[in-house]
Image: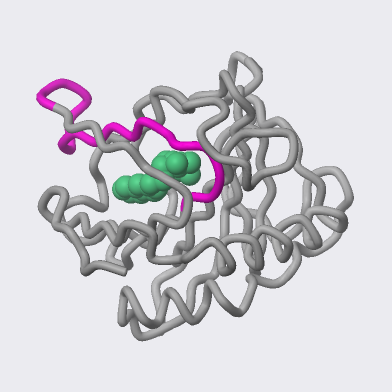
Amino acid sequence: MSGPVAVAPGVVLWRERLDRAAQAALLSEVFARATDAPFYRPVMPGSGAAFSVEETNFGELGWLSDKSGYRYVPVHPQTGRPWPTIPPALLDLWDATTGYRTPPQCCLVNLYRPGARMGLHQDREEATDAPVLSVSLGDQALFRIGGTTRRGPTRSVKLASGDVLVFGGPARLAFHGIDRIVAGSSTLVPGGGRINLTLRRVTKPE
Ligand code: MD3
Ligand code: FE
């Protein structure tokens, strides 16, 4: 294990912060919860165009995109049940890497099968004074991050299984996205592909 790398202002990367055994353990926690809260394919507000990524959530609030907009909701859109709990290993990782005073309220789970991508966007539906923590599992991905405007220079970083990123301060409102998945670069995810877990605070702590 090596130390953190400063990728950009406010962005810290721990390459392979989780070893293979920890990745496999976390993946089984994710799939166990996805039995109760199945992955679904969100659609874009307005147009209703389907995402190429499939999603589910854990925690008290889940991020949802549908025809009426982006928002955080307490239940799964198809089952109507509360989201499953956030895996304890992720809560420990949040404490160890962010030091933030309160635990995350949302764990958004993105499933990228080969060919899926995520266009450049900002995440601004939540309390942006808190950091976001991201964990990558499975196939490598080409991640791109820019500044707080859509135009301007961007940096690309290859993310691999077990990598952990924390975005805070000046990076919290940065445009970012996933340009592509490197199909077949990992054997971790059955059926192939990549899972990304992002931990977020949604509301401002008291
Ligand atoms: C920087 N996910 O879920 S993780 C997302 O790999 C999202 O699935 C990508 O963008 C993925 O919204 C990138 C890295 C990430 C996540 C959230 C951020 C970077 C961020 C929020 C603010 C700034
Ligand atoms: Fe994002």
Residue 191 figure quarter: top right
* Residue 179 belongs to the span the image colors magenta: no
**Is residue 105 depicted above or below 128 in this figure?**
below
Asked if residue 12 can be seen in this view, the reply is yes
Q: What residue is rendered at 48% in x and 62% in y?
A: 199
**Magenta region, residue range:** 136-153
Q: Quadrant of ligand 1?
A: top left
Asked if residue 124 can be seen in this view, the reply is no
**Is residue 20 depicted above or below 157 in this figure?**
below
Drawn side of residue 92 relative to residue 35, left or right? left
Q: What residue is rendered at 19% in x and 34% in y?
A: 146
Drawn side of residue 150 relative to residue 179, left or right? left
Q: Locate the C terminus by quadrant.
A: bottom left
Residue 114 place in picture, x, y as percent:
60, 24
* Residue 147 belongs to the span the image colors magenta: yes
Drawn side of residue 202 relative to residue 85, left or right? left
Residue 132 place in picture, x, y as percent:
37, 60
